[in-house]
Image (cartoon, coloured by chain):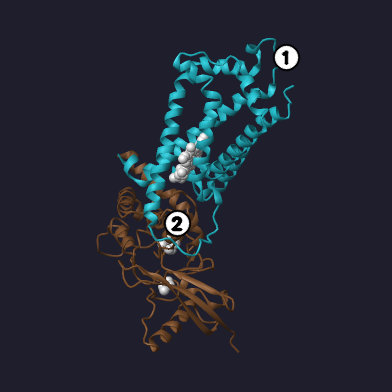
Amino acid sequence: MWIFNSSIGRKLIMSLSGLFLISFLIVHLSANLALLAGTGGAATPAEIPYNVVCHFMDTNPFIMVMVPVLALGFLVHIVYAFILTAQNRKARGNDRYASSSKTNISWASKNMFILGIIVLGFLCLHLIHFWAKMQLQHFIGGTPDANAYQLAVDLFTNPVYVVIYIVWIWALWFHLTHGFWSAFQSMGLNNYNWMPRWKALGSVLATLIAIGFTIIPLFFMFGLNQ
Amino acid sequence: MDKTINVTLKIWRQKGPKVKGAFETYKLDNISTDSSFLEMLDILNEQLVSKGQEPVVFDHDCREGICGACSLYINGHPHGPDDSVTTCQLHMRRFKDGETITIEPWRSAGFPVIRDLMVDRQAFEKIMQSGGYVSVNTGGVPDANAIGISKIDADEAMDSASCIGCGACVAACKNGSAMLFVSAKVSQLALLPQGRIEAARRAKAMVARMDELGFGNCTNTGACEAECPKNVSITNIARLNREFISAKLKD
Ligand code: HEM
Ligand code: SF4
Ligand code: FES
């Protein structure tokens, strides 16, 4: 199949999986913004706005179907990141230039793999912090933490985790500033007119996503939920 | 009076494709800033020959920026520090007195070193042979204006056709990708009605050959476009992706 054994096909896989992951990020951020409502004057943990959202997410059939698809999306993107990077190193050859390249290109575009690895590392940590205690329990028949809101409060009152999460999110920001327009280029949906538009849209989107995810830990660290 | 400068050259020397190479350092005095970079290397070679040493091997032909024969990775840039020129159009006025200039061959698995600074770029010819042409029947020359072509398409095709096949795009690319070259060659024909007819077949054949020859997967860093002496745009790469994907989807 050309998708797997041509360079452009492999790039198509990378771009489609990457854009799918971006769409997930947008859904995820929208749900998380409910954290900013704090306890919302709720009498019981179940009534806290964020917990209401989590309950909806955990019981909604569409989301339940999408969880394995999302996992597959990540897997494909990561596996192809390794394949493409290995092939590209081989194509570059063993003899490296002695003088370091002075070609003026964006830092993110040169470091997509490293940025991806950073994102992946923190992602695992993040899954342990939240997902393992929440949604995973639905799949393995355990009892999910009834107060996911409290998990966020507990984690982000520790400044160390706040810093870790913010570093993570801004690594993702770099990944997306290059990744977004690059995905459209890889799909062939680009030309002189659209190049600046995709790049601008990518920067705006990456920045909105990053700011959104940065506000949440800061919100709890500064105790604004009380 | 000519202004002259003294320079130190760090040049990659390698006796053959399989031999291990190394840098050699040469001092060159009183080089006119009006001389071209290749003239400067000619002067070096004359001095080496007169001392009974082997001259430095490098590619060159037209020396006016149109043939694509010259190469050289100079101080971290393919074709040197100037924008939009080939190495043969580079002049010594771009360098400072006392400067050390590092000169390396194109480095990419697709372009193995033949000797010193000369690399084997036959891979590009092989890609061209796989489809970079229009199949025409010989016969009377048709009237040039018989087929209407929009100014926009004609201009873009012309810009794509300005690619001289030098290989700087591959040399600049961290992925050793030949996409800028291949996309320019596909675009210059795909944009015109005569070339359009075989566009799908051409895109598939040239990409297949490019992959087979071991060039890398393009990750859109844009290094090729930044270093291309002819300013070939990466919008050509988007067009190649489009041509290739739609050709495959139609199969
Ligand atoms: C939420 C997480 C992620 C999102 C939204 C995302 C998104 C994207 C997008 C849109 C692209 C551009 C695709 C293209 O140029 O065609 C891309 C490229 C890339 N991603 Fe990710 N990515 C994510 C996580 C990761 C992870 C975990 C890795 C792991 C190793 C990774 C490695 C790469 C690499 C190496 C590239 C460049 C490959 C290329 O351009 O061919 N990404 N990513
Ligand atoms: S695209 Fe530019 S850099 Fe690449 S071969 Fe053609 S002229 Fe040289
Ligand atoms: S020698 Fe012909 S382009 Fe430089």
Chain identifier, colour cyan: A
Residue A219 lies, with reference to residue A143, above or below; the image says below
Taking the image as drawn, is residue B179 in sight? yes
Taking the image as drawn, is residue A189 in sight? no
The one of B220 and B188 positioned closer to us in this rendering: B220
Q: Position of residue B132 (x, y in %)?
A: 32, 58
| Residue type, label 1 | Gly
Q: Residues within 10 Å of mark 2 (few under 14, many from 20)?
A: many
Residue A210 lies, with reference to residue B230, above or below; the image says above
**Which corner quadrant of the figure contains ligand 2?**
bottom left
Q: Which residue is mark 1?
A: A41
Q: Position of residue A135 (x, y in %)?
A: 51, 19
Asked if badge 2 and badge 1 are on a common chain, one would say: no
Query: Are the residues tagged 2 and 1 within 8 Å (C-beta)?
Result: no
Residue lying at the far top of the rendered structure? A43
Look at 51% across and 36% down and name the residue there.
A121
User: CB of residue at label 1: within 8 Å of ligand 1?
Assistant: no
Mark 2: secondary structure? loop
The one of A190 and A174 positioned closer to us in this rendering: A174
Q: Is residue B220 left or right of residue B18?
A: right
Chain identifier, colour brown: B
| Residue type, label 2 | Cys
Q: Quadrant of the N terminus of chain A?
A: top left
Q: Chain of mark 2?
A: B
Q: Which residue is mark 2?
A: B173
Mark 1: secondary structure? loop
Q: Residues within 10 Å of mark 1 (few under 14, many from 20)?
A: few
Q: Is residue B130 left or right of residue B76?
A: left
